[in-house]
Amino acid sequence: MEENAEIYRPSPVVVEAANIKEYNQLYKYSVENREDFWAEQAEKLFWHKRWDKVLDDSRKPFYKWFVGAKTNIISNAIDRHLATATRNKLAIIWEGEPGDVRTFSYHALNREVSQMANILKAMGVQKGHIVTIYMPQVPEQVFAMLACAKIGAAHSVVYGGFSHEALAERINDAKSRVVLTADGGFRRGKPTQLKEIVNKALEHTPTVEVCITVRRTGQETFMENDRDYWLHDLKALPIASPRCETEVMDAEDMLFLLYTSGSTGKPKGLVHTHGGYQVYTSTTHRMAFDIKDEDRFWCAADPGWITGHSYITYAPLINGSTIFLYEGAPNHPYPDRWWKMVEKYGINILYTSPTAIRGLMRFGESWPKKHDLSGLRLLGSVGEPINPEAWKWYHRLVGGGNCPIIDTWWQTETGGFMICPLPITPLKPGSATRPFFGNEIAVVDDHGVEVQPGHEGNLVIKNPWPGMARTIFNDPERFRKTYWERFESQGWYHPGDSAKMDKDGYFWIIGRSDDVLKVSGYRLGTAEVESALVGHPAVAEAAAIGLPHELKGNSIHCFVLLKTGAAPSRALEDELKKQVADQLGAIARPEEVHFVESLPKTRSGKIMRRVLRAQALGQDLGDISTLEE
Ligand code: WT7
């Protein structure tokens, strides 16, 4: 934490334009009248039937919001716009990496989504089914999510960078009958081989009967009879009518499940629902990003992560914004690709990650300086703590010193922003500032006692909020244990982050306090990396830790104990790195693999990663009284 952090006050222009001009009073009202506050936000949306009760907390921690209400997030994200001037406004501007452009008005979006919805229905998808989506960043990825929601099926989007093993595991957990994919996408000038990965995954997924493929790159791919269909062929059939009724759902019906890493090997499918999620995401987006009718909003995440679900697909469409989507690499063909597009399309709000900013920073100041970025009004950051150096570069070179940086702390589990500034909030580089409305957040010790300002502790959220995940798919007990057991008597949510709060009530996130790593903003479990390593015939035991990395924030370092008979070598090191990358995806590739003679363990046999980390960083080993030897 920067004890004497500089304070950046918003310029008079920003304050003048802001929809919300005062935080403290509204915050006080929102936490003292939480249900009223959220009911007032919910009233801004369309409901097929109003709720009987805002919050049902009778079965903690399995909270329910807007109980009794009938809705569908699509009624708000698309349908209601068709009756207003928004109908002919652009919903999506998409640019492919090769430079091709496609645009869709809300009217056109509705036709695309309806066609896909009808195709899914014709393929036997029904309300309550889970459809897996594994796609590159093409508009069809967004259409596919919206089409599922429209017919009451849940989607499970698997990030297109994941391996076939990871994809198969997620398809099997969700028991999907239908998978949507593409032949590939363009990345750094080359087509990716997405359908090939799907073909491999589908060798191990007994429930899959249908796979629909979008043609993007035109590559040849194996198409299995009676299983594989090209989307463009289906769209030409009478089944694909561009008119489709939106299914009326209960507020608490599942909208999607999204897998994320935890401290054990098995990824967890977090469940989000139609009602509360639409209220929470649209409110946080509208207030924190101060959304205006004419805004062009670019969230440069992949739709396959929660950031893309909440702030590419759902919240901006509910708020009737124009979203911008880009398919490829930020530095292709040159490191000013992003800045060129910001200028070309007149982007007003750019929301990205510290890792992306650091990546573009290393090419120097000349690239953003080539472009007129004065259309930008606000900038955003998410995924990991932003180092003040990257913050200042982003602020000065991208924002021209005029754009507040909305640093948003949240998680897959929270659905939307939990700690973030408003445009009017005085900023301290590296702090996500204050809680969003309705949330009481604190830093406590292991007994739940609030620590002094400036001291490190566990971040906790003391209240339910409408966007919260409802459970882990098929494993409610794991949900209770992972997030609610630690501070059970208090009834607080435990996100697994350590943090400090300063004397002004600003939060400074330090990082994960559990066995989860953030590498380039991606979330990985140490256990997943370790089990990939142990899967290699030469490996007896393995431990993975994160160490600070200039570009990635953290990088993965592995400590490996070989089986007798196996010998350490450069070749084996490379083989092990490849093993992890193949099994989990390229993002999980270890920075280094160290061969060791033993691993530090507790007497009960648990690997003490904390000790490995301290050793690697040359720090004091801390309390090692439980160490085996
Ligand atoms: C973890 C959640 C929320 C969408 C992307 C990540 C870290 C996230 C920030 C931030 C400091 C942050 C936390 C959190 N994190 N945003 N603004 N400042 N840390 O979602 O993959 O579920 O990861 O990301 O450690 O627990 P996720």
Image (cartoon, rainbow, N blue to C red):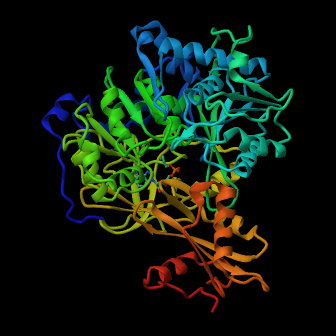
- Residue 96 pos. (x, y %): 49, 31
- Residue 53 pos. (x, y %): 54, 28
- Residue nearest the viewer, comparing 251 with 163: 163
Q: Residue furthest left?
A: 12
Answer above or below: position of 541 versus 161: below
- Residue 114 pos. (x, y %): 63, 15
Looking at the rendered image, the quarter that the C terminus falls into is bottom right
Q: Is residue 210 left or right of residue 260?
A: right
Q: Which residue is painted at 25% across and 48% down in the image? A: 366
Answer above or below: position of 29 versus 603: above
Looking at the rendered image, the quarter that the N terminus falls into is bottom left
Q: Which residue is painted at 44% across and 79% down in the image? A: 617
Residue 297 visible in the shown view: yes
Quarter holding residue 255: top right
Answer above or below: position of 449 versus 117: below
Q: Which residue is painted at 48% across and 56% down in the image? A: 520
Q: Which residue is painted at 24% across and 66% down in the image? A: 3
Q: How many marks?
A: 0
Quarter holding residue 26: top left
Quarter holding residue 449: bottom left
Residue 290 visible in the shown view: no
- Residue nearest the viewer, comparing 217 with 381: 217
Q: Is residue 190 left or right of residue 236?
A: left
- Residue nearest the viewer, comparing 9 with 465: 9
- Residue 577 pos. (x, y %): 63, 66
